[in-house]
Image (cartoon, rainbow, N blue to C red):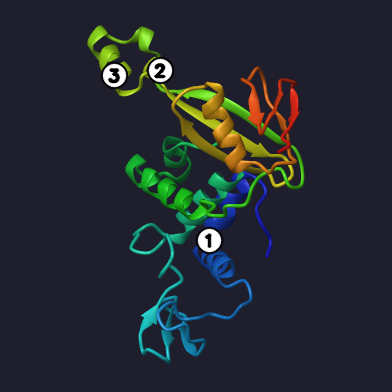
Amino acid sequence: MKKPVTLSQAIAYFADVDRAFDYAKFLRWPDGKVTCPRCESESNSFVKTRKLWFCNGCKKQFTVKVGTIFEDSPMGLDKWMTAVWMICNCKNGISSYEIQRALGITQKSAWFMLHRIREAMRDERTHKFGEGGPVESDEAFIGPNTKMMHRDARLRSIELNKHQGRAIVMGLLDRELRQVRTKMIPNVKREAVQDVILNQVGKNATIYTDNAPRVTTGSKKRDSFTRPLIT
């Protein structure tokens, strides 16, 4: 099935309700075998006028939305498919306001769609990074600039987070798998950074980072820009 390459192509492609329906059907059942989400029976009949199936096993009707993140949503598949395309193809991320402007919907609906799609994209795998290539590591401070706050608000923010009122997020990027993992850490000291790296990265991996604290693995310490972790 042909896939749109640009945003304008995606909006034009999924503007056709029938085409959006066929695309959603292809994503859910790529082998073409439509199965009932309740009893998993493959014996069913398609009601073309209503775009739903009648299961001959459990004698109930179902649509392509049932059992997915699209279920119980009044938004059409033309909006959903475009939103999925935007989130999957925007390298730097996308906000609910951008989805609102692109799809012509309310920000509340865009926020709802954004969170459901992100939940579906969450990777539950627990494999370690660095088995097939190098890993990049970095930290970032997320939150408002406390220097620009009113004194009372600044004190409340600092009380919630002891490090200048900002949350500290550490990210790891596996260059070979093109996957990213993030984790909140209490501080940027060696122990906190090292725990994340040793738990998420394989022992023979090479890590690329900036001026990070030392990483201790066993009895060896390494300070170079490229640090192989050896136990």
Q: CA distance from mark 3 to mark 2?
A: 9 Å
Q: Which residue is mark 3?
A: 159
Q: Which residue is mark 2?
A: 163
Local packing at callout 1 (Cα closer than 10 Å; few below 14, some 14-19, many 20+) is few
| Residue type highlighted by circle 1 | Asp
Specify whether residue 91 is in view. Answer: no
* Residue 225 coordinates in the image, percent (x, y): 74, 22
Local packing at callout 2 (Cα closer than 10 Å; few below 14, some 14-19, many 20+) is some
Q: CA distance from mark 1 to mark 2?
A: 51 Å
Side (left or right) of 58 relative to 20: left
Quarter-of-image position of residue 193 = top right
* Residue 1 coordinates in the image, percent (x, y): 68, 65
| Residue type highlighted by circle 2 | His
* Residue 178 coordinates in the image, percent (x, y): 68, 44
Taking depth in this image into account, of 9 and 120 the one nearest to the observer is: 120
Which quarter of the rendered picture does the C terminus lie within? Answer: top right
Q: CA distance from mark 3 to mark 1?
A: 52 Å
**For the point 47% across and 88% down, which residue is it?**
45
Name the outermost residue toward the front: 219
> Mark 3 and 2 residues: CB-CB less than 8 Å, in contact?
no
Q: Which mark is residue 24?
A: none
**For the point 73% across and 39% down, which residue is it?**
205
* Eye-nearest disc, 1 or 2: 2
Q: Earlier in the sequence, mark 1 or mark 2?
A: 1
Quarter-of-image position of residue 110 = top left
Quarter-of-image position of residue 208 = top right
Q: Which residue is mark 1?
A: 16
Side (left or right) of 118 relative to 30: left
> In terms of secondary structure, where does tag 2 sit?
loop
